[in-house]
Image: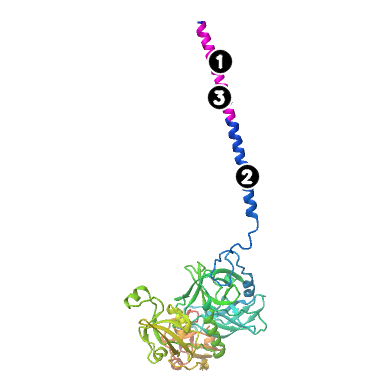
Amino acid sequence: MLKTKSFDNNFLNFTLERNKINNMKRLVSTVIVASLGGLVALTANELIKKQIHKSASPAPLSAPSAVSLTNYNGALSGVNTDFTNAAEKSLNAVVHIKTVAERANNLSYDPFAEWFFGHKNNQQPYTQQGSGSGVIISNDGYIVTNNHVIQGADKIEVVLNDKRSFIAEVVGTDSNTDVALIKIQEKDLPFLNYGNSDMVKIGEWVLAVGNPFNLNSTVTAGIISAKGRSNILAGKTNPVESFLQTDAAVNPGNSGGALVNTNGELVGINTAIASNNGTYQGYSFAIPVNIVKKIVSDLSEFGAVQRAYLGVSIRDIDAKFAEDANLKSLKGVYVNGLTNGGSADEAGIEIGDVITKIQETPVSSVSELMEQISKYRPGDKVNVTLMRNTKELSLTSTLKSLENTTAIVRKAEVKRTSIAALGAAFEEANSDELARLKIQNGVKVAKLSDGRLYRAGIKEGFIITSIDKKKVSSFSDLEKLLNAKNSGDGVLIEGIYPNGMRAYVGFGM
């Protein structure tokens, strides 16, 4: 028993000693690991401090400059582009246009009731108001806007950025480009200089300046997202469309406002938006300023647009058509028809040719070719570059009018004829008005005085399309139908206003 106990004691002592040694080893290991960890952390901290200090130091002068985010020559990077100079130039040259038009309510008319109970005016007039924008283009008060902004207006008020207000007169309009020129009587006005829309590049920064939702002097920024857009002006007989597309926010009230580049130069007139709900949804369209310049020059000099034509029927080239027509390239515009004795015919252009340039400007779509031709007047000569089979040719063409002449057209004096009893002067509606309103015939009320039409609620601009359900195409038709009436007979007049509102008016002779 004693031996056994002694052995147990010795074993216990040995175990305790071994545990002490292990504990010491673990302690030493912990101290060493901790020391190493502290040393590593200290070293890393010093390295980080040095790196931070290095990063905070100014970059050497030889460091490469930031990559520009736009392909517009002279522009700064997308992050640092400064729009303040362009905005300052534009704000004072863009005006708020307010229009007022007197209209008659389209109320029902019962001619039998008038025969029994006498004349009663059921056409109660009301006032229709509109709003848009315009751009001052000269210091003596000439202003460009959209035709649809002022169309049918009885009064046009122009409010400047400094809150001064003027009544404007219409110099001329062109529905095919949706351009209108108006004027106020004032001098020393701020105005925008023309840029060059041919030089505008996709990706270039632009500003849209106008008065959306009657919010005066609003500036938005975006880029040119496309050029040569067409099929924007619906319902026009011979539209000239090659719009600049931008993603600068444009809303109702911006129509007629300025699209400017970062130099503050006018490159377009904002006209339309692509929208499913009537407000901005990402894209808007502007008339290129090179088209605007030509229209403005014609309207101010001649009172009418001098529109030139090449005398060709043309189409765009896509991959399928190129294959079918055995064309080697998709560039240019294909000639598939000629006007006999027209500009192209006389210049030697042939069916099957592919027009690639007008003057020195490349054209790759119908809209681009139309844009280039729209800058010229009948009688002007242009160089036309084309491909015939595999050979490039350069021909000179003398442009002609739609009537196939080189004559300049001046605004004709409108022939007006009146019928005293009605208290009105009339003129025949022109083809543009008929096409826009989608009617085939009509005689317009050009001037009103106190008479039966005025008392019946008819306003100037009303186009009479029928009398007693009989078509009216000319003043002679109008006169014949009215002269057939006896005193006391009832007359039912049907017609349409410039804003598209139809009206039926009855009165007694």
Give above or below for 415 relative to 385: below
Mark 2 residue type: Asn
* Residue located 60% across and 44% down the image: 44
Marks 2 and 3 sit apart, C-alpha to C-alpha, by 34 Å
Q: In the rendered structure, which disc, 3 or 1, sits on the residue that comes first in sequence?
A: 1
Q: Which numbered disc covers residue 45?
A: 2
360 is within the stretch colored magenta: no
Residue 152 horizontal/vertical position (percent): 53, 81
Q: Secondary structure at mark 1?
A: helix
Q: Residues within 10 Å of mark 1 (few under 14, many from 20)?
A: few
Marks 2 and 1 sit apart, C-alpha to C-alpha, by 48 Å
Write down the residue under mark 1.
13
Q: Secondary structure at mark 2?
A: helix
- Between residue 156 and residue 172, name the one nearer to us: 172
Residue 208 horizontal/vertical position (percent): 57, 72
Residue 43 horizontal/vertical position (percent): 62, 43
Q: Secondary structure at mark 3?
A: helix
Residue 97, picture quadrant: bottom right
Write down the residue under mark 3.
22
Tell me the magenta residue range.
2-28
> Is most of the magenta stretch helix, strand or loop?
helix
Give above or below for 416 relative to 368: below
